Image (tube, grey):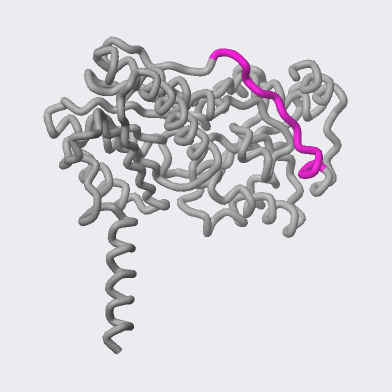
């Protein structure tokens, strides 16, 4: 009996260490670390993970070359907003050297909480569509704003040209980045004389109803770089196929398009992660202030891609003009 109790205690301690909030190794008090970089990610999906992994790999290489020891303290809120706030509080209370905040929710909370703490902790954001309200003397980073006018033109090509069709946008109502993209797409469609429809969902439970209703109004659907929709992209595809909705979907980024879209023109989140690493190195090693560094975007090497597997599953024929465009861009 005593043996089992000891084993149980070991498991509890191990779990506590894995969470990282108390006990065990504390990187913030380890004097061998030149820098501790705290990473906050709201949930797991391809784009955000690419932005994190590329940031860590690139910055690790730079630090190694400079002879600096860096420790990355990574924590994921797994979609729980209150946990995300607790994570940022933990980083701030430990006086971390830098917070790398991935996606809008994390960036907003990091900006607010570091400001309340005096604004001395640098914050680097990534995967934020419109960072205007986040920027501060201690906050800069990388925007993932994608070329939405080109996305609408891509949808126009998928519909055979002309303007006699309707674009529908499905988005999460609680995500500011998605609201911004939805409004931008709406304005572009209005300027181009293309009809527009929209459906917002508060959570994944409303996906089936919203997609079915939107498909009755729209000929093609656009999914912005939306964290909830990205995390349930497989469900979007299954809903589209299994319920015979069969509406063609264009996604704001490649990872989503691999699962549920027929085509996209996407930024590269690994590229964005490397841009963020450049900024972090300039601040930590080269001594620059975040206020000296304008936020960055990807302006080259955007990626066209099509997904003929998804297209076949919904019975949609990708026009040859779109295939030629993708081939020319490769």
State whether residue 218 appears in this view. no
Q: Is the N terminus in the top left, top right, bottom left or bottom right quadrant?
A: bottom left
Count how many numbered circles sit on residues in the image: 0
Q: Specify start and end residues of the magenta stretch as a single range.
A: 299-311
In-front residue for pair 161/76: 76
In the displayed structure, 176 sits above or below 266; it is below
Location of residue 166 in the rendering, given as x and y in whole percent from the top left corner? 69, 33
State whether residue 32 appears in this view. yes
Q: Residue furthest bottom?
A: 1
Q: Residue at x 48, y 35 (%)?
A: 53
Q: Residue at x 12, y 28 (%)?
A: 118
In the displayed structure, 62 sits above or below 115; it is above
Q: Is the C terminus in the top left, top right, bottom left or bottom right quadrant?
A: top right
Asked where in the image residue 282 lies, by quadrant, the reply is top left
Residue 157 located left or right of residue 193: right
Q: Residue at x 87, y 25 (%)?
A: 320
Residue 1 located left or right of residue 159: left
In the displayed structure, 177 sits above or below 153; it is below
In-front residue for pair 116/73: 73
Q: Residue at x 83, y 33 (%)?
A: 318
Location of residue 267 in the rendering, given as x and y in whole percent from the top left corner? 57, 25
Q: Inspect the magenta stretch and tell me whether residue 168 lies in it.
A: no
Location of residue 322 in the rendering, given as x and y in whole percent from the top left corner? 80, 24
């Amino acid at each position: 009996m005593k043996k089992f109790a000891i084993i149980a205690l070991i498991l509890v301690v191990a779990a506590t260490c894995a969470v990282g909030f108390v006990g065990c190794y504390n990187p913030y008090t380890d004097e061998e670390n030149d820098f501790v970089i705290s990473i906050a990610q709201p949930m797991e999906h391809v784009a955000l993970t690419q932005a994190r992994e590329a940031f860590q790999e690139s910055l690790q290489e730079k630090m190694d070359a400079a002879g600096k020891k860096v420790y990355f303290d990574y924590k994921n809120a797994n979609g729980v907003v209150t946990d995300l706030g607790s994570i940022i509080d933990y980083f701030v209370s430990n006086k971390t050297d830098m917070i790398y905040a991935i996606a809008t929710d994390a960036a907003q909370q990091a900006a607010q909480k570091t400001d309340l703490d005096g604004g001395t902790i640098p914050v680097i954001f990534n995967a934020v569509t419109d960072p205007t309200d986040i920027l501060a003397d201690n906050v800069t980073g990388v925007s993932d704003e994608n070329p939405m006018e080109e996305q609408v033109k891509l949808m126009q090509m998928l519909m055979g040209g002309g303007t006699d069709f309707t674009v529908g946008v499905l988005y999460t109502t609680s995500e500011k980045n998605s609201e911004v993209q939805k409004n931008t797409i709406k304005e572009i469609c209005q300027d181009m004389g293309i009809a527009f429809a929209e459906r917002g969902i508060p959570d994944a439970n409303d996906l089936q109803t919203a997609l079915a209703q939107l498909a009755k109004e729209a000929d093609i659907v656009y999914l912005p770089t939306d964290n909830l929709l990205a995390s349930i992209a497989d469900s979007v595809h299954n809903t589209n196929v299994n319920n015979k909705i069969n509406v063609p979907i264009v996604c704001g980024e490649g990872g989503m398009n691999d699962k549920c879209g027929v085509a996209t023109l996407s930024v590269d989140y690994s590229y964005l992660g490397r841009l963020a690493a450049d900024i972090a190195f300039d601040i930590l090693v080269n001594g620059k202030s975040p206020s000296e560094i304008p936020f960055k975007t990807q302006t080259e090497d955007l990626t066209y891609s099509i997904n003929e597997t998804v297209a076949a599953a919904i019975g949609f024929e990708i026009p040859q003009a779109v295939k030629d465009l993708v081939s020319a861009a490769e």
